[in-house]
Amino acid sequence: MKITLSVLFLFVVTAFAGFRANAQQKLICTVEDPTGTRLNVREYPGSGRIVGKQRNGTIVRLEFWTKDPSSAKAWGKISVYRGGRYVPLGYAFGEYINCD
């Protein structure tokens, strides 16, 4: 009985670990700002200080989604590929990031 419970526990932990890995998988996305200007990348969601700008068509990696606490609109934490690795940039307005 003890062995059976241990095996069951191991199975559940392994299955959950696989689910978590898939849930945290990074997405490769494209900047699509309909205003025709470069997309502002901010220090934090909402009205955070602008720390960079990205041109339309730039490929970015979406690290995770979050919400602006004041407006509840979606923002994405993004990174760009530079020097052989992804470098975190900041937060971009979610409606201007296309991950299809």
Image (tube, rainbow, N blue to C red):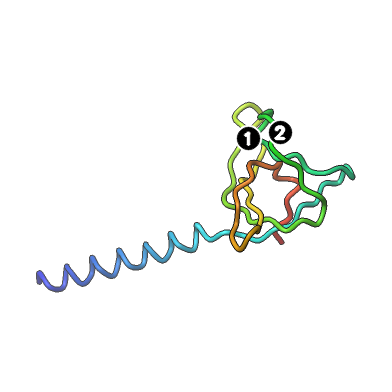
Q: Residue at x 76, y 52 (%)?
A: 31
Give the amino acid at mark 2: Ile
Q: Is residue 58 above or below residue 33?
A: below
Q: Are marks 1 and 2 in contact (CB under 8 Å)?
A: yes
Residue 71: x %, y % from top left: 66, 29
The answer to whether residue 14 is left or right of residue 54 is left
The answer to whether residue 82 is left or right of residue 38 is left
Task: Tell me the SS state at disc 2.
Answer: strand
Tally of numbered discs: 2
Q: Which residue is mark 1?
A: 43
Badge 1 or badge 2: first in the primary sequence: 1
Q: Residue furthest front?
A: 83
Separation of marks 1 and 2 at Cα, in angstroms:
6 Å
Q: Residue at x 59, y 46 (%)?
A: 65
Crowding at mark 2 (Cα within 10 Å: few <14, some 14-19, many 20+): some
Residue 72: x %, y % from top left: 63, 33
User: Which image quadrant: the C terminus?
Assistant: bottom right
In this view of the protein, which residue sits in the foreground, 17 or 29? Answer: 29
Mark identifier at residue 50: 2
Q: Residue at x 20, y 72 (%)?
A: 7
| Quarter of image, res 46 | top right
Residue 61: x %, y % from top left: 64, 56
Q: Residue furthest right?
A: 36
